Image (cartoon, rainbow, N blue to C red):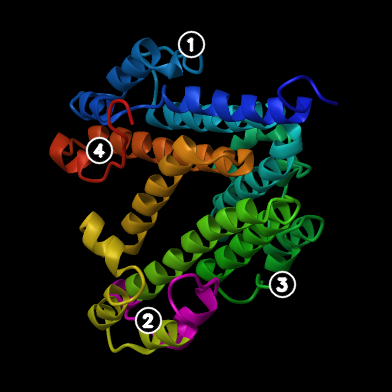
Amino acid sequence: MKDGGGTMQDKALNSITSKIRAKYGKMLTFSDYKQLSGLSSVSEIASYLRTRTKYSEALSGANDSAIHRDHLEDMLKKYRISETASICRFERSVGDELFRFTVRREEADALLQFIRLLYANNTESYIPKLSYTLDKYSNIDFVGLCNVKDVSGMRNFLSATDFRTAALLMSDDSPADFDIIETAFERVVYETAFKSIATYSDESARQSLKNMLILTAELSDCSVIIRGKRYYGAAPDDIGPDLLGYTYLIPQKTFKKMLIAENADAAEDIFKNTGYSRYIERFGTADPDELRLMILHSLASHNIHFSSSPPVVMMSYFAELDIETANLIRIIEGVRYKVSPEQILGNIIARTEGN
């Protein structure tokens, strides 16, 4: 249907990109993070967020003087999921598939949390935290999950979900290799994302979205290799099953060199000479985890300002929401453990005023 300047769908898609750009303008800036990192308690952080930022509605029911770290972090995660759902509902022709990926990722996090507690014989401490809105969208019975008491029950529970492949890795007789189990969950999340991306007709948008995801997976694998060697002295055969195996800027043969490198420093030297060298120079770090967030923030910010593709703008905003939530949790933890503001800010990735 045409309406003067274009189809109704075109106008709807333009509307969602405008809406996201307006929301992006209200995200926290480095100035906010500087103020927050200088506070002395979780209560003061909650008060600042509630009275001086976009989180006023999300924290409207919070008692600043009595709020606990876990409660505040859950409220922030609830905001992130609710905000994602709201954006996706606004233009469902774009948002439904991206939200499917979001739901799958949150499901994976919640299930992995329970599995860790199960192997530690501590499931009674599990709280189905998906009560912070995801239970509205997930088909998984997270309340029923609380009735699982052993590994056999967990395998049966997972067999009725999209994470059934992870059930095959769980043994009654041997300790769980959480890294391998986590990788199995992550593969399901990535497969869901790629299937969602494949539904978009714009080839350029599909490629941009795939690049963001594969870059994330590739840098995650680099981190697994370097950290495995540095902190656990892990052998290649131990690290290999923990890798996702997606490649973007690093050829498979280079990954193999990193994997069989003598130690972490040797693996890191190889990493520094890959396609990420220009980013390492630009951002001043060779830590794959830090680099991943910095590159994602740079790409997402650019896309939000300049991309004309609604799926790309939407996915980029969701990436920025993830980074903002991670920043706030770092600040909460830092303030709680009396880390200096300078140290806290050293791990923060943020936009400046007007950007």
Viewer-proximal residue among 297 and 330:
297
> Is disc 4 placed on a helix, strand or loop?
helix
Task: Look at the image and tell me in which quarter the N terminus lies.
Answer: top right
Spatial CA distance of label 3 from label 4 is: 38 Å
Between disc 2 and disc 4, whose residue precedes? Answer: 2
Asked if disc 2 and disc 3 are in contact, CB closer than 8 Å, the reply is no
Q: Eyeballing the image, is 265 above or below 321?
A: below
In the picture, the disc for residue 168 is 3
Q: Which residues are magenta?
A: 229-252
Question: Type of residue at label 2?
Answer: Ala
Percent across and percent down for residue 317 are 51, 37
Spatial CA distance of label 1 from label 4 is: 24 Å
Asked if disc 1 and disc 4 are in contact, CB closer than 8 Å, the reply is no
Q: Eyeballing the image, is 121 above or below 41?
A: below
In the picture, the disc for residue 77 is none
Q: Eyeballing the image, is 256 above or below 336?
A: below
Spatial CA distance of label 2 from label 3 is: 23 Å
Which residue is label 2 attached to?
234
Question: Type of residue at label 1?
Answer: Ser
Which residue is label 1 attached to?
60
Q: Eyeballing the image, is 6 above or below 248?
A: above
Image quadrant in which you'd find residue 203:
bottom right
Spatial CA distance of label 2 from label 4 is: 30 Å
Asked if disc 1 and disc 3 are in contact, CB closer than 8 Å, the reply is no
Between disc 3 and disc 4, whose residue precedes? Answer: 3
Q: Is residue 112 visible?
A: yes
> Is disc 1 placed on a helix, strand or loop?
loop
Question: Type of residue at label 4?
Answer: Gly
Which residue is label 4 attached to?
334
Residue 241 part of the magenta-drawn span: yes
Q: Nearer the viewer, mark 3 or mark 4?
A: 4
Question: Type of residue at label 3?
Answer: Leu
